[in-house]
Image (spheres, rainbow, N blue to C red):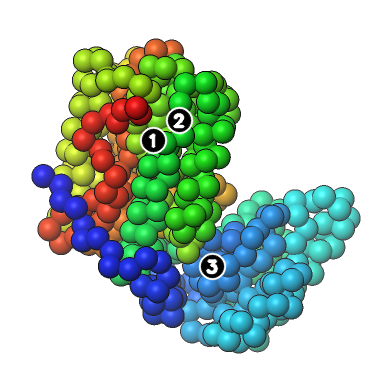
Amino acid sequence: MVKMAAKLTFVGREGIDVTRMREERTARVRQVMKQRNIPALLATNAPNVRFLTDLDWWEFQPRLCYCLFFAEHDTVLFGHAGAYQQMPDLMPWIKHWRIGRAWMDGIAGDAATREDAELWASEIREELEKRKLAGEPLGVVGYEGFAEEVLRSKGLKVVAGGPVLLEASRIKTQDEINCLKVVAAICGAGWQRALQVIRPGVFASDAAREIQQALYEAGAETPFAAVVSGPMTFERNLCSVNRRIEWGDLVYIPECGTSFMGYTCCLYRSFVMGRKPTSREADWYKRMRERIERVIDEMRPGKTTADAAQHFPPASTWGFKDEAEVLTIEWGHGVGLVQISPGGVHYNMPIINRLWSFKHPQPFEPGMVMAVESCEGEHRVGGVRMEDMVIITPNGAEYIDSFPRDEIMVIE
């Protein structure tokens, strides 16, 4: 039986030791860098830069800010216009700042792009030379293709840096766990608002906007909600289909990507509009819930993702031919702040699914925070979804989201 984790005794940031969290994160990254013999890490994408430096940056274009993070030297933060002028005196723990170079995927044309990229790579090499690291491996996160080619043209030894951040963020500190508990609690406010605003005749987009407002009022840094209803609820639909909600519809609401201090959640709940669930719908939900519970019950030290994945049914259960057809629909994954590639939800290690886990199992360890999701239903008829977030403790997994999950909730 999966237990509930201890609830928070504070509301928001006052319960988070931000300095301790930053220092413990960076210490872990440096430890992994030394283990992998990568003395320097070039990282971009706003969540990754935030993980390494605490720079909270609205990245309205790709790769505007980036940093050189070192195993044994102080970080160099390359800030974009605005951040470069505004933030150094507000972030005294970052001792070295330079203006960032960003060609924004070539919008200025080929010649300007090549010119700016050459300057960008030269400045990176210059900082590495100052520390006698120009001949050592440079881990790169968030850049690929053309950017890596330019770095290599400067004689730099480019290696993959993503695995460093994934490994370093695999196990969360207590402050990180508390951030994820806060965002899970915030999500309850969103679903509560859903019970109040979803009515027959309401458009999905209007209901989603009300739910997002509730999330924002509850303290979300970035709120997100979608409302999926009726025949769109199975298999899963995250495309923008702005249906008018009807009496009797099944409805599910993801709040995935809602964040607190950069830490994103991944949570779903299912509802039915104006009536009790049918016996068939209740059976769908019961099978799905019990499946998720069996998966979560395996998530304990000494077990692996292969042990948990055996409780997910094969994709053929729904008539699918390939396990890729349920990738991101029926699986478990770490959550946190690190985000190797663009996306609204920050997927972390480890991963539980039938596609990868049997051949490539990953161990469960205390301090991991994970989400587990599944669905049931019938194509173009309807279905149910649920996703839970848990922390793995020495004695097993514990729920950190407390909104009701035992049955489909009725919207009166």
Verify CB contact (< 8 Å) between mark 3 and mark 1. no
Query: Is 241 displayed left or right of 381 in the figure?
Result: right
Q: Amino acid at mark 2?
A: Ile
Q: Residue at x 39, y 48 (%)?
A: 189
Q: Amino acid at mark 1?
A: Leu
Separation of disc 3 and disc 1 at Cα? 35 Å
> Where residue 279 appears, x then y in whole percent?
21, 15
> Where residue 110 appears, x then y in whole percent?
86, 51
Query: Is 70 displayed left or right of 363 in the figure?
Result: right
Give the quadrant of the C terminus: top left
Number of the front mark, 3 or 1: 1
Give the SS element for disc 2. loop
Q: Residue at x 40, y 26 (%)?
A: 251
| 195, 220: nearer the viewer | 195
Q: Residue at x 20, y 49 (%)?
A: 299
Give the SS element for disc 1. helix
Residue position for label 1? 195
Residue position for label 3? 50
**Mark toward the start of the polypeptide (3 vs 1):** 3
Do we see residue 315 in this rendering? no
